Amino acid sequence: MTLSDASPRTHDALEVLHRVFGYDSFRGEQQQIIEHVAGGGDALVLMPTGGGKSLCYQIPALVRGGTGVVVSPLIALMQDQVDALTALGVRAGFLNSTQGFDERRTVEQLFLAGELDLLYLAPERLRTEGTQRLLDQGEVSLFAIDEAHCVAQWGHDFRPDYLALSMLHERWPKVPRIALTATATPATHAEISSRLGLGEARHFVASFDRPNIQYRIAAKNNPQKQLLELIRSEHEGDAGVVYCLSRASVEKTAAFLVEQGIDAVAYHAGMDAAARAANQSRFLREDGIVVVATIAFGMGIDKPDVRFVAHLDLPKSVEGYYQETGRAGRDGEPATAWLAYGLQDVVQQRKLIEGSEGDEAHRRSQSAHLDAMLALCETVECRRVRLLAYFGQESGPCGNCDTCLTPAESWDGTVAAQKLLSAVWRLARERRQKFGAGQIIDILQGKKTAKVIQFDHDQLSVFGVGADLGTAEWRGVVRQLLALGLLAVEGEYGTLVLTEASGEVLGGRRSVPLRKEKAPAQPRKESGARSGSGKAGRVPVDLPSGAVPVFEALRAWRAATAREQGVPAYVVFHDATLREIATRLPGSVEELSTVNGVGEAKLAKYGEGILEALADTRAAAAATAPAAPADPPPHEEEPPPVPEDLDPPWDDWE
């Protein structure tokens, strides 16, 4: 294998950034990362979704001689990644099991001829001896390992084939490697470094803050209707992702949304592969589609205009939650991360851990992940502060999460906790019985239900001692005691049992401050007007009102162009680029070339179409504009003087 003899310079990278991608400057640490890798150095990059990770390996691959090899875990998305690069004039291809022999052979020949800038491979294919021999015969400029958190031993997206990627440095020691991920705790960071042999690499850790995302966690109460209210009140016509724990929930929720007039599709691993691919394609290529999915969906999704991510079930870990919510608002526009969370979520997740495969260490790891997720749900502090702290980063209150917008109240729940724990203890001690939360709450509230009477639970000394709290309040107490480890669930039916720490509360040695249940947070107030309903969606908040019809006309042109070419709309242009065009109204190809996101290839391919769309918009506006008033007839008399005590109208314009 040969390596490029070129010595990359900063202006080379900047020239590529402007010529190919249409931007004039780098963001954050992009420039330092690109210079380091382009110069032959190894790098481990931790950067949030939407932070511009792809450029960190794409530009070095274009600056250095040879082909950049990208290890990507998702075959289904390679085509869209290649489409996006091809639209920019980049020579990109992929090798995976979806291709026939002739198609694979063509890509291999292009690689061997040095006619590919970037080649995408799944880790499974890279492990084959045939692929390794192919790479030996060509010129590789770098290896990029995307979604590098997959190497984590207990990672939520664990892929065993990633563990073999340490061989890259052994087989090709002179080729620089860059591993990238959008989520990693300090422990996961260390594990990625160890498993990929990147201990000597330069590590870049950007802020994980996504200030455009509003984090909200609501008490679960008919979650499907809560979701519908979220969509109709805040995200009508917007693209969104809804996560459910089970495949059955996915199917039911998607059907419910469709019945309510929402353009929704389902996605889970149990679906027919063709149907799953078709639904993913619709989500990526059409505007305003809502996909309801299990966590099998989403990793590597590049769609920039996802306006909301909703969870109808509790995520298993903060890492999973962060990565899933990070699929919203990749374009930097306001987005919502909404989670419905209730007692049954806690019981369900505890049961899943108890019945999971793996050794005791694995179950302890899962429990630790769940505990951190529960702490995020129950916090009275800023959710963003808690979220970033989990990843080892400090921040101040954000002012844009539900606990900041409607601060949570706490109350002394020690007595309530003692009552509930006492009921659990008495059932176990006096009756040798275990029950779930519903029966215990009925006992505390003094309800003589059929089940209470059947088991003579109205004879217990704790019967009716909790009548001062409502059912929702008691369920909140149970949920928080489970989150605090003062109560546990066991068995198939999720019965409540005491823990070692329960005795501290029952003995009066530990107080129990609890989070008071509160009304839902107010949705984000948008300063921009909505342009009707349906597929139009939300008008970006920073778009002048006069530019709104131009922006919508450009979106319509983009949609038609994308359909004609069979690519996602964002491959043509991102909303941010259309927004700038609608605001600046360039009148020539030269003016259009100065817009961010308009590189040489897109200017040549779409420039005339954009200018024609702008001209059509101006013509339509002129045709519908009211006629100018006719000149008044001549009058022989002088007009009356303007009274001196009237304010001139322009004083109100400020």
Image: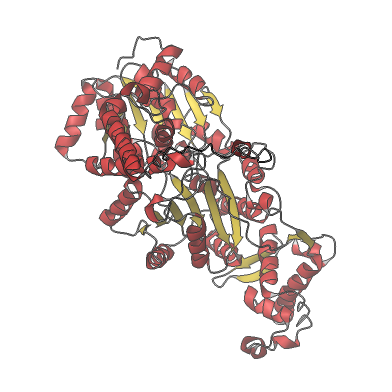
- Residue 172 location (% of width, % of height): 36, 21
Viewer-proximal residue among 154 and 47: 47
Q: Is residue 289 visible?
A: no
Residue 595 in which image quadrant: top left
146 or 30, nearer to the observer:
30
Nearer to me, 51 or 177: 51
Residue at 28%, 53% in the rendered image? 278
In the picture as drawn, the residue positioned furthest to the left comes out as 102
Asked if one can make out residue 61 in the rendered structure from this viewpoint, the answer is: yes
Return the residue found at the far right: 508
Image quadrant in which the C terminus is located: top right
State the image quarter where residue 420 is shown: bottom right
- Where is residue 357 shown, x and y percent of the image? 49, 57
Residue 187 lies in what quarter of the image?
A: top right
The N terminus lies in which quarter of the figure?
top left
On screen, residue 317 above or below 9: below
Q: Position of residue 294 (x, y in %)?
A: 43, 56
Q: Tell me where residue 345 appears, x and y as whole percent.
A: 56, 63
Q: Is residue 469 above or below residue 547?
A: below
